[in-house]
């Protein structure tokens, strides 16, 4: 079966099938190719719809397009990507497991070097240790992978729905923000539960 896109391509005399495939793939994923960046700096303005980035986490759900503006260039053999992005995510409260909507934005200035290049002297090794440098395999890297990583880095270690979230009852699992349970009285802050238990043990011993 010939799709409409490839049928249209067959009419074109100038482009080779490989070029067409490459361009088509790029349209969806944006691959930053080290050989192309060697020729020219690329400016990027793209929008990634929810579901197109893989955050490697079931607790991160993108609910609005991620907008990125950046430039990519080759600097001393390394791919440099700098710019910023913003989006909205649905996360999970660490205390009550309810969903939390967070506006996330971040500026970044990143360097990636080929994992096949080995520093040839100590000087270069020193430079490597100084700056945070990522690595890419083969001809380059996908912008989507860079962004997914940056989103993860932009998030707080623990997300909480509100500062006075009462969390879940450690005993029956009820969400204490919504209802009280009949379990023995529990500390208002679930995080203090181990501390309270310690105190109890201590007073029993007295
Ligand atoms: Zn909560
Ligand atoms: Zn309970």
Image (cartoon, helix red, strand yellow):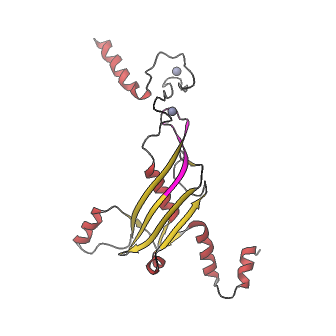
**Residue 171 percent coordinates (x, y):** 50, 23
Q: Is residue 88 magenta?
A: yes
> Which quadrant would the N terminus be assigned to in this image?
bottom right
Instruction: Please tell me whether residue 95 is drawn above or below residue 110 in the rendered image.
Output: above
Q: Nearer the viewer, residue 109 or 22?
A: 109
Q: Which residues are magenta?
A: 85-100
Q: Nearer the viewer, residue 82 or 20?
A: 82
- Main secondary structure found in the magenta portion: strand
**Residue 4 percent coordinates (x, y):** 75, 74
**Point 45% across, 32% down: residue:** 163
Q: Residue furthest left?
A: 122
Q: Horizontally, is 25 left or right of 125 in the view?
A: right
> Which quadrant would the C terminus be assigned to in this image?
top left
**Residue 42 percent coordinates (x, y):** 49, 73
Q: Horizontally, is 118 left or right of 99 in the view?
A: left
The image quarter in which residue 193 lies: top left
Q: Horizontally, is 167 left or right of 124 in the view?
A: right
**Residue 24 percent coordinates (x, y):** 63, 73
Count of marks, rendered view:
0
**Point 45% across, 54% down: residue:** 106
Instruction: Please tell me whether residue 191 is drawn above or below residue 139 in the rendered image.
Output: above
Q: Nearer the viewer, residue 202 or 37?
A: 37
């Amino acid at each position: 079966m010939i799709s409409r896109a490839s049928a249209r391509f067959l009419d074109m005399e100038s482009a080779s099938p490989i070029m067409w495939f490459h361009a088509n793939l790029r349209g969806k994923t944006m691959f930053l190719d080290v050989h192309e960046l060697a020729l020219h700096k690329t400016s990027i303005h793209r929008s990634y719809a929810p579901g197109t980035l893989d955050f490697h986490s079931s607790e991160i759900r993108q609910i609005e397009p991620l907008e990125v503006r950046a430039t990519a260039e080759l600097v001393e053999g390394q791919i440099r990507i700098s710019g910023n992005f913003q989006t909205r995510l649905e996360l999970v409260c660490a205390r009550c497991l309810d969903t939390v909507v967070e506006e996330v934005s971040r500026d970044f200035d990143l360097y990636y070097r080929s994992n096949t290049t080995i520093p040839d002297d100590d000087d270069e090794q020193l430079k490597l240790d100084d700056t945070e440098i990522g690595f890419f395999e083969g001809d380059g890297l996908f912008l989507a992978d860079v962004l997914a990583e940056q989103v993860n880095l932009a998030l707080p270690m623990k997300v909480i729905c509100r500062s006075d979230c009462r969390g879940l009852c450690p005993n029956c699992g009820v969400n204490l923000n919504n209802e009280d349970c009949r379990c023995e009285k529990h500390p208002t802050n679930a995080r203090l539960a181990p501390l309270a238990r310690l105190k109890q043990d201590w007073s029993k011993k007295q």
